[in-house]
Image (cartoon, helix red, strand yellow):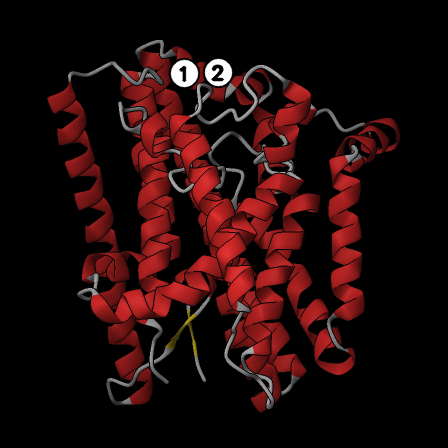
Amino acid sequence: MKRFWEIDALRGLMLVLMTVTHLPTRLTDPLGQPFGFVSAAEGFVLLSAFVAGLVYSRIARNQGVEPMRRAFWRRALKVYLSQAATLLFLFTVITFVGLRIDQPAVKNLLSFYLANPHEGFLYSLLLVYEPALLDILPMYVFFMLLSPWVLAYALRHGWGGLMAASATLWALAQFGLSEWLYGLAVRHLGLSVPFHEMGAFNAYAWQFLWFIGLWIGAGRNAPDARPLRFPTWLVAVAGAIALYCFWWRHHGVHGQAPFGADIELNLLFDKWQLGPLRLVNLGVLGIVAVRFGPDLMRRIPRLHVLEELGRASLPVFCAHLVAVLLVLAIYGDSQTARPAWGDALLLVLVFGWLYAVASFTSWWEDRGERRRRGQPGQVLPDALGDRGRG
């Protein structure tokens, strides 16, 4: 099976945007949420879920549900081990460097761990304690463990009831479901991890985005699948809304906060809760991308650098965390800690490091694939950069 280079390139673009957003430089704010009130995280989650639905539903149809479940679980284990390795790097190298030079950014990042090292280490391995920047992979593990059951049910009974339940859970998350469940855990289990140390992403809201992507990806393997097409009027409305959100984001007086200091209204676009207007903004961008993306991809040169990054999404994601954490430990979180030329040099070094990781990963996986198959072969991309087999 051929790889979808367009998806690889898009995931590579998401990784580039995440890296620029997380690195404290002068480009952090201008390139944060560049297409409107939507960040690279939403695109990355949606694309990963789409490819997971595409790959694992094919396994379920061709080999059965049990092989599909085992493939999901193997992937979840790989993501978990990546999270554990990144945590180990944070708790050793970054902690040592940050404390040695008395770096406030590291002390703030690791405040719970520094105060409770044993509890912090244990709860982090249980994916309960999630330091900032290390809170997206635990969400992926959660989704990957749920997905085989959801996908198996959907292949037998359809997606209607599942997506209704997912939308209901998303709606409950907007009204404090996470906080309520946290209160129960504190009251009945004696949980000692503060709520704000359990990750910024509200997984009960973000599951809706994941299962939308899983649904769309699985639908591409259906016997009666048709190309995704939208009415002209809908594309026109979506384009108008997308352009307005783009203008609002970059020319509004409040930048990434659409309503300025109004906390209640900003929740409508909230990233961590996946607010309703944020979903609208993402949806219209998706419609525009589906309508015009294929034509654009045929007219521009292949973006091989982005493809390489997207093919090795998981290692590159972890490598970007290593780079960002080192910068925070040495320079702190100030976006003006270096001159402009220093920011440029830093970005060149970081992206050189990411490309080296991606190239090595591709070489290593191609080598292993050739050994297993006895020939070069081509394979499909899996969620977060793994390689599924059709």
Q: Quadrant of the N terminus?
A: bottom left
Is residue 81 shown to the viewer in this render?
A: no
Viewer-proximal residue among 243 and 197: 243
Question: Does residue 239 appear to the left or right of 202 in the view shown?
Answer: left
Res 210 quadrant in image: bottom right
- Whether label 1 touches label 2, CB < 8 Å: yes
Secondary structure category for the residue under label 1: helix
Q: In the rendered view, tell whether residue 63 sits above or below residue 111.
A: below
Q: Classify mark 1: residues with Cα within 10 Å, few (<14), some (14-19) or many (20+).
A: some
Q: Is residue 299 left or right of residue 90?
A: left
Relative horizontal placement of residue 276, taking residue 78 as reference (left or right): right
Residue drawn at the location 56% of the way across and 61% of the way down: 234
Residue 336 at what x, y percent from top left? 26, 14
Q: Position of residue 342 (x, y in %)?
A: 14, 23
> Mark 1 = which residue?
105
Mark 2, residue position: 108
